[in-house]
Image: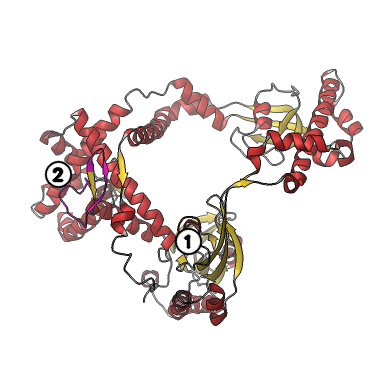
Amino acid sequence: MMRQMRENTKWIMLATAAAFVGLMVFQWGMDITGRSGMGPGELGKVNGEPVLYDAYNLSYRRLYDQLQAQQADAITSQQVSELEDAAWEDAVSQILIRQELERRGIQVTDDEIRSAARFSPPPEFRTNPAFQTDGRFDIQKYQQFLSSPQVDDALLLQLEAYYRDVIPRGKLLRQVSADLYVTDQQLWDAWRDEHEAVEVRYIPLNPAQRIADSVAAVSEAEVERYYRAHLDEFAIPEQAQVQVVVIDKTPTAADTAASLEKAREIRQALLDGAEWDDILERPEVGEGSGDLGWFTRGRMVPEFEEAAFAARVGRPTEPVQTSFGFHVIEVLEKAGDSIRARHALVPIQRTEASELDLLTLADSLETLGETMPLADAAQALGLPVVPATLSQEFAFVAGAGRVSEGADWALEEAEPGEVSPVFENQQAFYMMELQEVRPAGHIPLEDARASIEQTLRFQKKLDMAMEEARGIVERIRAGEAMENVAAEAGLEIRSAGPFTRGDFVPGLGRLNAAIGAAFGLNEGEVSDPVQANNNVFILQQTAYVPADSAAWEAQKDEQRARLMASLQQARLQAWLEGLRDAADIVDRRAQVLNQGQADQPRHQQFGIF
């Protein structure tokens, strides 16, 4: 065992060093206030204390690396902007937390560090295979590792720094959330909401279809009154009218064919005797590949499932296309209605040549846009130009999706006639030319008339349906059979359940007044008319399934721990927001970080350029 640890010591220290960079802000974060580092300048102040570039940059790099690890595609300029804001918030939060630790006099002793190091290892150690036995963390292996002479002093110093940071933060968290407590009644109520179930039958009146428009006429005076009373509903935000060129990043048919060919090559390699471990190391094989374990029908997407259950044991299938890409599947075992399988996934991505063509096109568009109108630049490259209206609330362009960066540029920076740089999001590259900015205002009555009439007409229908439903309920409660009353009115009786309070119920919806009414009834009782989902319902409870109190008792402690963790997180977030609201925060990023960009040429290269 110790030989394995010695062999793994270097790897463990490298992995741990990398992990320390990605520790969480509050509970796992190292001190990134950057007080000992010097960057190009102060980016701002928090209660008079500077936020230095080193602190901001360390947070940015951590967030950047985390995001890149989560996605195969390159990080876009829009995501970079979001990461910059997140890094600033992170750096500010670190300073606020440290200031609060100092204000409260929270410290850590050497004994606390030694105890925590022995009995509360960082999460990265708990998940390290070198410290596990039968797949579970083994505290003895970890403690033997700490006592080993092979452990580098640098790692021990890192651990000490980690605990000197984490332990005070844990104390602070306990102080902030000291008054939180979850009673047994609260736990039972939450358990009951998740497990108590009912069955109902119900009558939907569907006023939109049941009542003719002619019966619910709307007058001009009603329209005008509604418009005046709800003027805020017709507010129009500031809008930018732009022309847009979109370069779609979706893989082409040729890219799809290339991915298919790679999947075929993988299958042939397996048929020729290649080891699966080697196949899974290939760069074209995507995340999620490998052993899938046992599964039954209904667990996988239909295309994958059909091929897997039709496959012969031990023989790789032809590539199967799903929304994830191309799969080469090998069934390892079959037993009853279950199979165990593994697969190699080849995602459909742009080839290097295709990516190069895309980036060259985006770069060429930006170069041309520096010296000519957008329409001329687009025409030179054979690209279409489309009009779009953007606001901060609705910054979307067909083919490009959300274009927040472009909207910010058009509404806050550009002048009419100006051409933007090329922006990038996960769907596309895009470039804009601003035509005009329209100030905020209101939709004219004439333009709003049709929607107002529709709203008022439906409300009248809803009122009529509620009145009819009240009469139906009276007759049923007086002793008439629900079936007879419904048939006489030309209405349908439907059934639903069993369902819990949180379930989505076809025909009734989710978490609405109809669901609440169903649980407020006794078995056999008929509800008052209920409005929900633009409909009117009459419900009758037909069965009740109580929550299992014995099962609740058996898991109560775990439930309490989960709920307390959630409440602590919410309290921490609210507490941090309170600190931030009360703090004097100065943000100078725009001046400092952009200082060196003003004299730089606008032209930029994309991707590998």
Residue 151 can be seen in this image: no
When asked about the image quadrant of residue 10, the answer is: bottom left
Q: Residue at x 51, y 28 (%)?
A: 190
Please state the horizontal and vertical placement of residue 425, each as a whole percent of the image: 47, 63
Can residue 173 be spotted in the picture?
yes
Name the one closer to the observer, 258 or 140.
258
Query: On the image, numbered disc 2 is attached to which residue?
Result: 160
Verify whether residue 24 appears in magenta.
no
Relative side of 439 to 351, left or right:
right
Vertical placement of 367 versus 190: above or below? below
Judged by depth in the image, the label closer to the viewer, 2 or 1, is: 1
The magenta stretch spans which residues?
A: 30-49
Residue 176 versus residue 153: which sits nearer the camera? 176
Question: Residue 32 in magenta?
Answer: yes
Image location of residue 204, percent across then percent down: 78, 35
The residue that appears at 86% across and 30% down in the rendered structure is 483
Q: Quadrant of the N terminus?
A: bottom left
Q: Quick check: 117 above or below 321?
A: above
Quarter of the view holding residue 248: bottom right
Q: Amino acid at mark 1?
A: Ala
Helix, strand or loop at mark 1: loop
462 on left or right of 43: right
